[in-house]
Image (cartoon, rainbow, N blue to C red):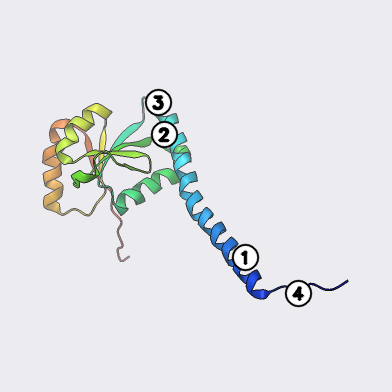
Amino acid sequence: MPVEEHNPAVFAAVYAALSFFSLSLIRIARPLVRDVFYAIDCSRLRERKDVSRILVYGSGLRYRAFRRELVRTASANERMIVGIIDDDFLLRGLYIGGVKIFGTLLDAAAVINELNVDTVVIAFEATEERIESIKQTLRPTGVKIRLFSLRESEI
């Protein structure tokens, strides 16, 4: 019986293709699984009356970090994101991680009433003047305003 010779180039090409496919699948599946668990948690929280309903102001990287923190504590969570507002009016109607962008700060009062929001979380780097402006705009709604920030400080 003759011994078959294997071509190392073919082996390397197949190995590279399978590795690429496997790694790509893992990179795609991980956030999808996280989104599914967050959606399950939100459906559980929607039924409860004592849950804080959050409108996030900002849809960039800080929003994603804030949402990731909520997802990490999913089973112990008493808060849920019900919507996003962002200064970029072109984002209106789009979804980020299953959460809809409802408009800009000018639309906030209507969105807060429509979604029964009790807290607005600012998820972008804002100056003190900008925070004061946001507080003035949101004061008539009576919602709590919180700032989510990523800080590095010397200790």
For label 4, the residue is: 5
Q: Amino acid at mark 4?
A: Glu
Q: CA distance from mark 2 to mark 3?
A: 10 Å
Select label 3 or label 1 by which is in front: 1
Q: Which mark is residue 14?
A: 1
Dot 3, crowdedness within 10 Å: few (<14), some or many (≥20)? few
Select label 2 or label 3 by which is in front: 2
Q: CA distance from mark 4 to mark 1?
A: 16 Å
Select label 2 or label 1 by which is in front: 1
Q: Position of residue 142 (x, y in %)?
A: 18, 31
Tell me which label, 4 or 1, sits earlier in the chain.
Answer: 4
Quarter location, residue 81? top left
The answer to whether 2 appears left or right of 101 in the picture is right
Q: Amino acid at mark 2?
A: Cys
Q: CA distance from mark 3 to mark 1?
A: 52 Å
Q: Amino acid at mark 3?
A: Arg
For label 2, the residue is: 42
Q: CA distance from mark 3 to mark 4?
A: 66 Å
Q: CA distance from mark 2 to mark 1?
A: 42 Å
- Would you say the residues marked 4 and 1 are in contact, meaning their CB atoms lie under 8 Å apart? no
- Image quadrant containing the C terminus: bottom left
Residue 63 lies, with reference to residue 109, above or below; the image says: below
For label 3, the residue is: 48
Residue drawn 24% across the image and 27% down it: 114
Residue drawn 40% across the image and 25% down it: 48
The answer to whether 31 appears left or right of 137 in the picture is right
